[in-house]
Image (spheres, grey):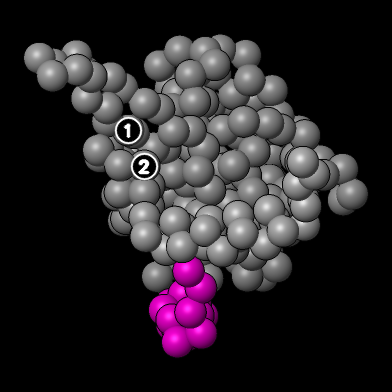
Amino acid sequence: MEVDSQSNVNIVVPVAIKLASAIGAPTKSRGDRSRRTDRRNYANEPKSDLIEKVVYVNRCAKVVKGGRRFSFSALIVVGDQKGHVGYGFGKANEVADAIKKGTEMARHNMIQICLDKHTIPHEVEGNFGGGRVILKPASPGTGLIAGGGVRAVVEAVGIRDILSKSLGSSNMANVVKATLNGLRQLRHHAQIMQSRGLVTTVSEKSALPVET
C-alpha cells in the first residue's frame, strides 16, 4: 500500500503548531514594543564627557553548604581625555554592579595630570607595590606604545604619543596604580623653574597652569 508523503506533511505541520502553542512557546506580537521603548529611553539619556574603561574583571568563588557562591570585582579607569583621570575598584555579586561601583569610585578619585600637548613633558618612573612602569615622551605620530593597564590609563587621560615599559609585577591593579604614580610626578618646565625661584620671563610665567 502506497502512502502519500505530501498528505503526511499536511497532517503533521498543524499538529506541531498546536503542540507548540500548548506548551507555551514564545510568539511574536506587534503590540509588544517594550524593547523599542527601552532603546528610545536609553538614547534620550544625557551623555557624559568621561570615558570609562574596564581594565580587569575578576571572579571569586566561595564554597558554601549549598554549593559555590560567586562574587565579582572590577577595576575601572575613568578620564575626560583632557588631563583628568581616576581609577576605582568595585566589588559586587554581579558584574554590572561591580562595574557601576568601580565607575562611581573612579569619578570621585579623579586627579589632574600635566601634559605637553598630546604627550608627557619628560621621562618618569612610577612605582606601586610590585608594579614598576617607565613612561617616556614621544614625537607626534608615534602612537601609544603601551598595553594592558598602562594603555587604559594613558588613553583616558588624553595622551596620544608615548613610550612605556612595565618592568615589575603584571598585576593589573599594581600596574594601574604605578602608572598613576608616575603621571602624578609630571611637571612643566615652568613649574620646576618656579619651585627653584628661577622664573623670570613672561612666557614661562604664562605657561604655568591656572590653579582652580
Residue at x 27% of width, y 27% of height: 70
Q: Is residue 38 magenta?
A: yes
Which region of the structure is painted magenta? 26-44
Q: Which residue lies under the disc numbered 2?
A: 95
Q: Secondary structure at mark 2?
A: helix
Residue at x 80% of width, y 44% of height: 2
Viewer-side residue, 26 vs 35: 26
Q: Is residue 55 visible?
A: yes
Q: Which residue lies under the disc numbered 1?
A: 72
Neighbour tally class for label 2: few under 14, some 14-19, many 20 plus, Cα within 10 Å: some
| For residue 67, side relative to residue 160 (left or right) | left
Residue 40 placed where, x, y %? 49, 83
| For residue 123, side relative to residue 110 (left or right) | right
Which of the 4 image quarters holds residue 14?
bottom right
Residue at x 53% of width, y 48% of height: 53
**Image vertical order of residue 178 relative to residue 7, above or below:** above
Residue 178 placed where, x, y %? 49, 28
Q: How many badges with numbers are in the image?
A: 2
Q: Secondary structure at mark 1?
A: strand
Q: Contact (CB < 8 A) between labels 2 and 1?
A: yes
**Image vertical order of residue 174 relative to residue 25, above or below:** above
Q: Amino acid at mark 1?
A: Phe
Distance, label 2 to label 1, CA atoms, is 6 Å
Residue lying farthest to the right in this orientation: 141
Neighbour tally class for label 1: few under 14, some 14-19, many 20 plus, Cα within 10 Å: some
Viewer-side residue, 111 vs 199: 111
Residue at x 68% of width, y 45% of height: 120
Residue 85 placed where, x, y %? 48, 52
